[in-house]
Image (cartoon, helix red, strand yellow):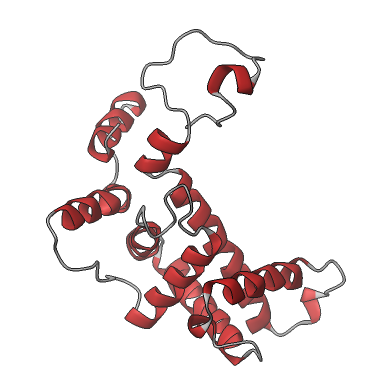
Amino acid sequence: MKRRELLRYTAYITGMAVSGPVASALLAGCKRDEAVAAGEAVYEPSFFTQEEYEFISKLADTMIPTTDTPGALDVGVPEVIDKMVGQVYAEESRSKFRDGLTALRERMDADEAGPFNGMDSEKSLVYLQDQDLHYKNPDTDWDTMPEVDGSARDTYFDLKSQIVGAWFNSEPIGTEVLVYLPVPGEYIPCGDLQELTGGKAWAI
């Protein structure tokens, strides 16, 4: 199902129109595909600064690199996040997100291992694994930490969630990596995934 078809389908099954900001976010990848096909210039962020956008792109590429399946950059994840934060988030949420992003970038660039954007792929992966352990450390009393640290932590996991969500909801992943049935058939509630799909997960 194409993104434009998805918008029409969503409007049909919910009985209401999809809002402009959400439609814009969903179609961001569609415009990217068209631009790439036409050999046009690389996407320019509309909300994030170029430096912020490059940082998010580096995060996305490190978390979901290109392997035997398309990576986050291949399916336009940073573009979707730029549209989502800039056009779907409420003004207060946008401001809070940007403050957290600034705190996160400053922390990661000031780290002894940094700056993050200058790391190669292997080093950046190890570094993000360390960040996960740091932010998930059950012994850390975040209530006594400076507010800026909590803001950086929340933004890190917000970005991680958006990166994974945008990747899974992209058209190439939904139709080429996961198992996609545009017209579902027989309902099999407890079937063996290996037998049904060859071990692949279902696309939503």
Q: Residue at x 36, y 52 (%)?
A: 75
Tally the numbered discs: 0
Q: Residue at x 47, y 67 (%)?
A: 93
Instruction: Estimate the x, y position of residue 115 in percent, counting from the top left.
Output: 54, 88
Instruction: Estimate the x, y position of residue 11 in percent, counting from the top left.
Output: 29, 31
Give the answer, above or below, for where 139 lies relative to 180: below
Give the answer, above or below, for where 145 lies relative to 181: below
Q: 33 left or right of 188?
A: left
Instruction: Estimate the x, y position of residue 44 in percent, counting from the top left.
Output: 25, 71
**Residue 24 visible in rendering:** no
Q: 155 left or right of 42?
A: right
Q: 183 left or right of 69?
A: left
Q: Which residue occupies the extreme front position in the image? A: 68
Q: Residue at x 28, y 47 (%)?
A: 23
Residue 112 position by quadrant: bottom right
Give the answer, above or below, for where 108 lies relative to 185: below
Q: Nearer the viewer, residue 68 or 8?
A: 68
Residue 171 position by quadrant: top left
Instruction: Estimate the x, y position of residue 85 in percent, counting from the top left.
Output: 40, 63
Q: Residue at x 12, y 55 (%)?
A: 38
> Where the N terminus falls, by quadrant?
top left
**Residue 26 visible in rendering:** yes
